Image (tube, rainbow, N blue to C red):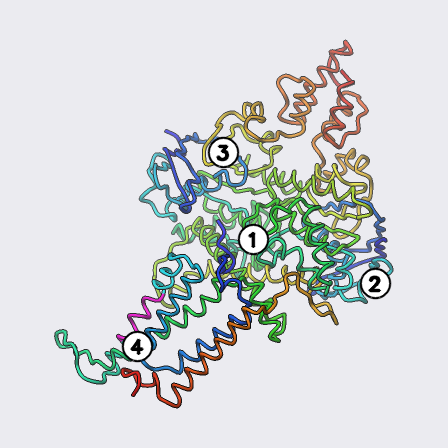
Amino acid sequence: MTIAIQDFSYAYPDGDWALRDLNLHIEQGEFLSIMGANGAGKSTLCLALNGIVPQATGGRIRGNVTVNELNTKRHPVATFSKQVGIVFQNPDSQLFSVSVEAEVAFGLENLGTPRDEMQERVDWALDLLKIEPLRYRSPSQLSGGERQRLAIASVLAMAPQILVLDEPSSNLDPSGKVELLTALHDLKNSAGLTIVMAEHDSELIAELSDRIAVLEDGRLARLEAPESLFSDVAGMHALGLGVPQVSEVAACLNQEHGTDLSLIRYQDAYQSMKHLN
Amino acid sequence: MAEIETQNVSFSYSEAGDVLRSVSLQIRRGEFVALIGQNGSGKTTLAKHLLGLLRPREGKVVIQGDDIRSKAVGEIARRVGYVFQNPDHQIFSATTREEIAYGPQNLQLQEAEIVDRTKHAMDRFNLTAHSERQPATLSHGIRRKVALASIYAMDPRIWILDEPTGGLDWRSTQETMALLHELNEAGKTIVLITHDMQIVAEHTERCIVMSEGQVVAHEATRTVMERSETLGITPPQAWKLGSALDLHPPPLTVEAFCRNYGEKLAAGRGISVGRS
Amino acid sequence: MSVAPDFYLAGPSWLHAADPRAKLLLLVLTVVLLLVFQNLWVMLAAWLLMLIVHRSAGVPKERIVFLLRALLPVTILMPLIWVIFYPAGEVIISIGFIDIHGESLAEGLTVALRIQAMTFAIFALLFTTDTDTLMQGLVRLKMPYSWGLMLSLALRYVPNFANSYSSVQQAQQARGLEYESTRGLKRVREMMPVLVPMIIGSFRSSEQMAIALEARGFGAPGVQRTYLNVIHMRAMDWAIVTVGLLAAVALLVLNIVYGFGSDLISIFP
């Protein structure tokens, strides 16, 4: 199960090219993060992965995006919704029901899932995101972190093979981010789920990603593993992007004091450095 | 005389209980202070009291020596600028220029002054090119700048900003913080509500920590970081790492880490610190 | 700080447990009967019956009082209009130079009671049925699903809209917004700084919602939508339906054939 993006360019109606000549292959089971300045095309890329771009958004398009051999221009979005689940930034715009359980079932109901299977999948998703105790609550009573997990559960209940998250931590406070990180860690370790996450928070990205794609003005500027990308602090800053603070520490020490450190996560940083004294 | 003072302010939205419980604090003129706490701790509620958007059930709010109880929000807005998190909550005009002029107009300044301030604000935020365009159609980053510019044009002595960097990319975050430093250096008092502890450590001198409607700490940023565990906040990576590696004092910034740790390394090697 | 998304308040009563379709039928029958009957005393009895239904469904006193208070202007206005503009019948009271004619007072009161009874009937449904169940009931009665979704989303977004109003209002106050007029066109113009961002915000939200709906398989072509909690008509529901229909038919017959309740004052003319 893969996504192949070939020579893909897209422009919104009345707009300039939001994505330009993208070539990217998303591997099964990988955790791919997408970084880029505001307006670089992260959200557009997310929407291109299940056909919403271009089918719901119109505009001009060149090249192809193929999900499991299916071209996103040629099949209804509903077909892709079974394979690619998208969680959006703002929980308020994607929660439709009066209870947590109903919300998780919503997508399955839309797809005409038989009742028994639905109940199983709902229970499974609630459990996976650890929101089973909230089953009968109204979404308006949930905290930011809980709402984000509810949105993820609602999408995962549809059993997609690919989960796409568009800036999931933007509206979360620190405790919400911790919940999100834990949930994504658990999901990463679930069999076969491929995860694509557009994000600004470099520390979150460092914790989870196998590869990072950096967009600049709609083009793919870099595609590397976190270790390699975050070591190039100057390069990232030039792209207008940040890196984990420990990476900045490593770069500074390497430059000023001749060390040879490559740090992207706090735990690894501590382990690496306690020997240096 | 404190620039901002609250005396035993208590407030609740409903019978559900007090969101602010007898909060007393003082902020001196020219301070750059962070206001932090979990969602629901009351920090936004407290901040809104400083503009008079909310009125305390008990206690008083004193701005620049004046009890604001009897003042209309419009009047307080001359002295206190409040930048909301979502620029789309305020953008409504047909052109960027009109949008930025709205605040000064409400302050009933002279026409010439309004034009002048609007132009100055647009220059400062690089919005002149968009002057005649409809702000609602511009990109999110630009809309944020328009919101900042519209408060900038009102030139308040006190600035309160609610999560100005949430969801912003790195470069925009740096630009925003640079703006705040510029304002602070010009003598403005800055109250920054944020969750980003890295920003707090790197840019603010004092912190007010709130929990469950009360101020649980109001100290130098360094002191707050030292008490981070009891206060339930997570310090930035440089601080955590520095503390774990026995750097004293623990570093608030990457540069400080580099310097202190570099000295330690050099001491370990028995050579003097300096670039090779 | 959020308001409940609908008027629903869970409870163990018979009315809560009843199938929404049965409740909808009762509501329709009630409204029809209320429109057919003209008699003041019948209307009073209907009004009392509605209150009894609410209490038997366990609706808290605060909510009933809330409705009564909300309806107070109408309840006072109707008799006033009738007494002033449609005087009829004998004068029963004279206050200064204002004569209050009996029949018009009765007429006005009847109208007021009818409005109250209808409101209570509708809220009997809304207080005891959550939006999803209600929509499913309508869909099973052959209403297109998309209409039901539109309705339930509209309801669900009412508190968001209210919050939006308050947020925008505060943001503009921070820029010196003050209202000078209190009513009319001038006030509407003054409210533009609040209305415009709210409207733009609504457009943005609905755009995002539309995309999110598509991403959740909404509108999948050729698919028969299923439901997690399927509603069933139980024996009790059929009993409610039967009793309701019988009572309605009986009352209608009494009214049409025997004139029961067709006159304003006398029950059996």
Chain letter for the residue marked with disc 2 in the picture: A
| Residue of label 3 | B210
| Residue of label 4 | C41
Q: Amino acid at mark 1?
A: Ser
Q: Label 4 to label 2, Cα distance in Å? A: 70 Å
- CB atoms of marks 4 and 2 within 8 Å: no
Q: Amino acid at mark 4?
A: Trp
Chain letter for the residue marked with disc 4 in the picture: C
| Residue of label 1 | A138
Q: Amino acid at mark 3?
A: Met
The structure residue drawn at horizontal position 40% and vertical position 78%, both measured from the top left corner, is C34
Chain letter for the residue marked with disc 3 in the picture: B
Mark 1: give few (<14), some (14-19) or many (20+) Cα within 10 Å. some
Under tag 2, what secondary structure? strand
Place of residue A117 in the rendered image (x, y in percent of width and height, measured from the top left)? 74, 58
The structure residue drawn at horizontal position 32% and vertical position 67%, both measured from the top left corner, is C73
Same subunit, labels 4 and 1: the answer reads: no
1 or 3: mark nearer the eye: 1
Place of residue C161 in the rendered image (x, y in percent of width and height, measured from the top left)? 50, 58
Q: Amino acid at mark 2?
A: Asn
| Residue of label 2 | A71
Q: Is residue A160 magenta?
A: no
